[in-house]
Amino acid sequence: GFIKFQAAAMIVMKPLQMVRTAWEDLNETLVETEDAIIALRRVAGDAANANELYDLAQRYGQTFENVSELATNFARAGYDWNETIKATEAALLALNTAELDATQASEGMIAILQQFGYEASELESIIDKLNITADNAAVSTDALLKALTRTGSSAKNANLTLEETVGIITALSEATGRSGENLGTAINSLIQFSTKASSLDTFAKLGGDVERVVTAYKQGGATVLDIWEELSKVIQKNQSASAESILGEGFTTEEFEALNEELKQALGENFAQTTEIYDTASTFRKNYFIAL
């Protein structure tokens, strides 16, 4: 009789316990959702519309938590509600097509928008560029975002477009296999070194098209990539003693040695091995990497 009583009690109580647990979970979800909306309205104002966020979450198969976090981050960056919704929708595409979380997606994309001067409405096309690059090269969307976050301002100041910067990051990624943070640090260091007044003056002394490109760069009509391309031509084709002497003067300074150490730390074993090989040759060959 006791066993029958226990079985009957379990049959009755189990569904009641499930209902109570479900109700508690629902109540917790409602509280968390309300807190998220309140936090969003603090930064986006009364224009913030929870229904639009619910709609985005449903259409893109994402949690409301992810959608609200994205929207809040974009609103905190100073975008109005319409811009926030556009940016949030584009970021949801990134979440669905790349291995990113809400924080990575929003922080990386905000950095790109602000550093390169894009509008929120252009974010979807930017994500397309990052994704198609990741699909066709040895670099991930996450690595591109992290590298761009670290080097975007320097790249923009060096007159590089987003596409050119992505190309440089991708080339360096394929050559070294390093993380996005490492790639961004290395490229940032290269740009900073190459655009110093002392470095530009050294490059200009090589004459020919290098001088012309350096002058154009100073006037805003060329990029640091243009300078690197011309340096590459000089190092590959011009074996004159004067050119080697000029490069030697420029690349044996304390600034270059500091850059060399930064690159070794950021780019790891591949770069260290390369510089060891060049160290066995002349100064001319030792400095090949700068032109590359």
Image (cartoon, helix red, strand yellow):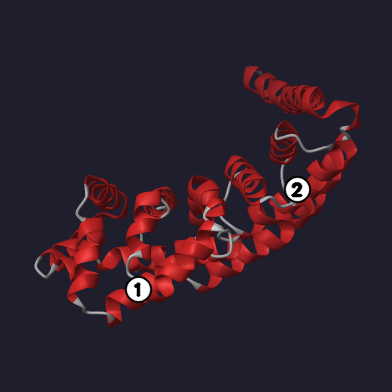
Can you give x and y, in whole percent of width and height, for residue 186 in the image?
Answer: 37, 52
Q: Residue at x 40, y 53 (%)?
A: 179
Can you give x and y, in whole percent of width and height, for residue 237 in the image?
Answer: 29, 82
Q: Quadrant of the C terminus?
A: bottom left
Question: Is the Cβ of the residue at disc 2 closer than 8 Å to that at disc 1?
Answer: no
Extreme residue toward the left, this view:
280
Looking at the image, residue 280 sits to the left or right of residue 189; the answer is left
Front residue of this view, candidates 64 and 211: 211
Q: Residue at x 83, y 37 (%)?
A: 80
Front residue of this view, candidates 196 and 171: 196
Q: Is residue 24 above or below residue 223?
A: above
Looking at the image, residue 47 sits to the left or right of residue 124; the answer is right
Can you tell which quarter of the image residue 44 is in? top right
**Which of label 2 and label 1 is nearer to you?**
1
Tell me, yes or no, if residue 35 can be seen here. Answer: yes
Query: What's the amino acid at mark 1?
Result: Ser
Q: Residue at x 24, y 48 (%)?
A: 261
Q: Is residue 227 above or below residue 99?
A: below
Q: CA distance from mark 2 to mark 1?
A: 40 Å
Front residue of this view, candidates 96 and 229: 229
Considering only order in the chain, which callout, 1 or 2, is on the residue closer to the N terminus? 2
The tag on residue 87 is 2
Looking at the image, residue 277 sits to the left or right of residue 266; the answer is left
Can you tell which quarter of the image residue 240 is in? bottom left
Q: Residue at x 80, y 49 (%)?
A: 86
- To which residue does mark 1 refer? 232
Query: What's the amino acid at mark 2?
Result: Ala
Looking at the image, residue 197 sits to the left or right of residue 216; the answer is left
Can you give x and y, in whole percent of width and height, for residue 291 in the image?
Answer: 33, 67
Task: Check disc 2 and report its element: helix, strand or loop.
Answer: helix
Mark 2 closeness class: few <14, some 14–19, many ≥20 residues within 10 Å? many
Can you give x and y, in whole percent of width and height, for residue 38 in the image?
Answer: 80, 22
